[in-house]
Amino acid sequence: MKAAFTIPNEEVTDIEDKKIVDLYWERDENAIKETSLKYGRLCAYIAGNILSSREDSEECINDTYLAVWNAIPKKRPDKFSVFISRITRNLALKKYEYLSAAKRSPAAVTSLDELADCVSGTDDVESEIEVKYIQRAIGNFLWQQTDEKRNIFIRRYWYFDSVENICTYTGFSQSKVKSMLYGMRQRLRKYLESEGIEV
Amino acid sequence: MNKKQLCNHIGNIDDRLIEQAGHIPNYRRQHRRKVIQRLAAMTAVTALMVCSFSAGAMAFAKENVVKVLVEPESVSLEEIGLTMILPDSWKGEYAVEKNGRNFIIYSNKIRDGSVRSDAFDGILFYIVCYDTAMTPEQFVENGYDFTGYRYLFATKSNTYILHYASDVQWDPSDPEQKKIYTQMASEIENIRFIPDNALLD
């Protein structure tokens, strides 16, 4: 089991994040060094939850820094920690798809398979408007849940944390966490259907 | 939709959700602390009851007439500068849970009575404080009317909305829970909201 890891506290890091973003805007290569110092572990944690090999994770993290370098002069992210986490997650998932099935991380496979409970599995083409609508509906659904359930759901399906790690964070038993996740998946499916979304 | 599409949609949820989950606390420890606090509060209440009973007995002996002002059942949501005046019948029947700048008001009897931890939260409504000032029309235009809601008011920089719970919040097989929920839900319209800084805004 990997050591539990959480985003550094916002109050402590917010000003530093602005400085890091400024460095990117100034095209100062120290930006990557500072990012690596502060968020290297977080990126490695997220990539490691999705990809099984250390080399793949490291490659993914380097791709993340490059992607941030390319993205920031156009954008000024409000929450840098979330911005970089999201890029890491997306790149790791792309890499995960690319890798052969034999190499896949059992943890990520399980998380993804669990999500199959919420959907029919059909390969529908979604328009940009539909995508936004679905994303907003998922967000709304999550905001309506209790703090515990919401955070556990996000830790599992956004951060791809193992159930064991979630238990370490929350102090809950595995059966409780699994039961909460199961209930959330069922309810998410019902909610999406009630919002007229074809799951 | 397939699971990969769902996974991508989850990947693009609100930044605040992701950040909040990044600071996930140890809930079990929190629950334990709450239990200890409740026990301490119960002990204090018991002590107060004993004292007031003694005082009452003495006052009764002297046949004094004491006028008692009944305080309305109110909850102050300090973080968002809002006070709720609830029906008196709600006393001891509800609880408030904080989620960032949002609040969940639920029936504690339904939640405590649920056997399974993942079922039936007894949520009556949510108070959501949006970070922008919106008129009722702008609120709809911005697409926030995703559930039943009651527009409360807006200040210079915030909009306060009561969102009704959109899911079944009680155990349909339990008529007692249904009765409690239906009764409380019918009284939501009687709740009054008072902004704490009305004079400033």
Image (tube, coloured by chain):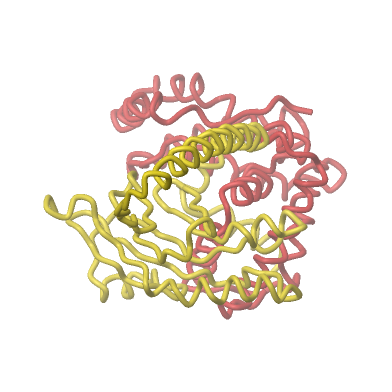
Chain colours: A red, B yellow
Question: Residue A16's image quarter?
Answer: top left
Residue at point 48% right, 40% down?
Answer: A82
Residue B49 x, y percent position in the rendering: 51, 40
Question: Residue B167's image quarter?
Answer: bottom right
Residue B158 x, y percent position in the rendering: 26, 56
Residue at point 56% right, 48% down?
Answer: A147
* Quadrant in which the C terminus of chain A is drawn: bottom right
Looking at this view, name the residue that lies furthest to the bottom: A196
Left or right of residue B138: residue B75: right
> Compared with residue A71, is residue A37 higher up or lower down, i.e. above or below?
above
Residue B159 x, y percent position in the rendering: 28, 61
Residue A171 visible in the snapshot: yes
* Quadrant in which the N terminus of chain A is drawn: top right
> Compared with residue A173, is residue B158 higher up or lower down, i.e. above or below?
below
* In-front residue for pair B103/A191: B103
Left or right of residue A177: residue A8: left
Image mark count: 0
Residue A116 x, y percent position in the rendering: 76, 63
Residue at point 65% right, 69% down?
Answer: B170
Looking at this view, name the residue that lies furthest to the front: B62
Residue at point 40% right, 39% down?
Answer: A79
Residue A61 visible in the snapshot: no
* In-front residue for pair B110/A166: B110
